[in-house]
Image (cartoon, rainbow, N blue to C red):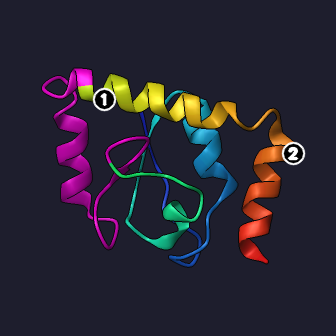
Amino acid sequence: YRFVIYPPLFNELPCLGMLEAMASGAILIGTNSDAYKSLGLIDGYNYISVGESMDVNKINTIVQSELVNKEKYIQIRINSLNFIKKFKDYEAMKDLVINELL
C-alpha cells in the first residue's frame, strides 16, 4: 500500500496500527488529534493530516495528488521510516502506545 488511512481510537488515543502502517512504508493519513501528536508525529513531515475529522474528499485529494507531490510524499515516507527506526521491535512500539493509554 502507498497510503494507509488510520483514525485514532476514540478520536484521541493512538493505535498500534498507526506505527505498523508507517513501518510498512505507507504514508499514514490521519487527523490532527492528540493521538498523533502524543506519539511525536508531525503533519506533513511523517504523516498527513486531513484536519479535525476523517474527510473522504480530503483523503481523495491527498491520494490523487501523489504524482504532483511525488518528491514531498517520498520524503514523508523516508521520515516515517526513520521515525519507526527508534523502535527496535514490536514490543517497543506496543509499549509506546500502551504508555499513552495510561
Q: Residue furthest left?
A: 68
Q: Quadrant of residue 96?
A: bottom right
Residue tagged 2: 91
Please indicate whether residue 30 sits to the left or right of residue 59 in the image.
right
Q: Quadrant of residue 102?
A: bottom right
Task: Tell me if residue 66 is in the magenta stretch.
Answer: yes
Q: How many marks?
A: 2
Q: Which mark is residue 73?
A: 1
Above or below, 31 relative to 6: below
Residue 23 is a magenta residue: no
Give coordinates of residue 84: x percent, y percent: 63, 36
Residue 75 x/y as whole percent: 36, 26
Q: As drawn, is 18 to the left or to the right of 51?
A: right
Amino acid type at mark 2: Glu
| Residue in the image at 62% along x and 45% along y | 19
Q: Tell me: 97 left or right of 32.
A: right
The stretch of residues the image draws in magenta is: 44-71
- Label 2 crowd bin: few (<14), some (14–19), many (20+), radius 10 Å: few
